[in-house]
Amino acid sequence: MKNEKKPLLTLTDAAANRVKDLMSNADSGVIGIRIGIKTAGCSGLKYNIEYAKEVKPFEEKVIVDDVLILVDPAATMFLIGSKMDYKESKFSSGFEFENPNEISRCGCGESFTVSNS
């Protein structure tokens, strides 16, 4: 049985389209978006998404539908196998992550915890 490598990150069509839309309205020099993890919230970790103007050392590159997603090296182990989506409702909109590494999420959905194993 072969060891199949999980993709670091996948994007839904909605997420890829939203990133393309954001990129079309971004300042000049923006080459993609960067995804990282910050210590925050009641569960411990929070996703951080920002515009990227350069590729930093050791960042993983994920290209989906001509969209460049850079993954902060400190976040890689937390994101392996995750799926990024974009959802809109009557009262909110934003990127959401389906992360197989999460073991819990706070009640408001703002932060998450991952397994230590």
Image (cartoon, rainbow, N blue to C red):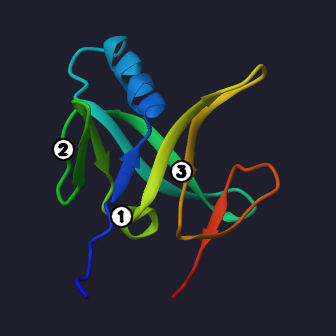
Q: CA distance from mark 2 to mark 3?
A: 19 Å
Residue farthest to the top?
Answer: 25
Residue farthest to the front?
Answer: 1
Choose between 19 and 26: the one closer to the eye.
19
Please state if 76 lies on the left or on the right of 47 as rendered. left
The amino acid pointed to by label 2 is: Val
User: Who's the residue at 46% across and 51% down the image?
Assistant: 83
Residue highlighted by disc 1: 76
Q: CA distance from mark 3 to mark 1?
A: 12 Å
Is 75 placed above or below 9 here?
below
Is 66 placed above or below 5 here?
above
Is 95 placed above or below 88 here?
below
Choose between 33 and 27: the one closer to the eye.
33
Classify residue 46 by image quadrant.
bottom right
Q: Decide which of tag 2 and tag 3 comes sooner along the chain.
A: 3
Residue highlighted by disc 2: 55
The amino acid pointed to by label 3 is: Tyr
The x, y position of residue 75, in whole percent, is 40, 62
The x, y position of residue 3, in whole percent, is 25, 82
Classify residue 72 by image quadrant.
bottom left
User: Who's the residue at 26% across and 31% down the image?
Assistant: 65
The x, y position of residue 91, in whole percent, is 78, 22
Q: Which mark is residue 47?
A: 3
Q: CA distance from mark 1 to mark 2?
A: 15 Å
Q: Pointer 1: residues within 10 angstroms few (<14), some, or many (20+)?
A: some
The amino acid pointed to by label 1 is: Thr
Q: Are marks 2 and 3 in contact (CB under 8 Å)?
A: no
Q: Are marks 1 and 2 in contact (CB under 8 Å)?
A: no
Give the number of marks.
3
Q: Pointer 2: residues within 10 angstroms few (<14), some, or many (20+)?
A: some
Please state if 110 lies on the left or on the right of 15 as rendered. right
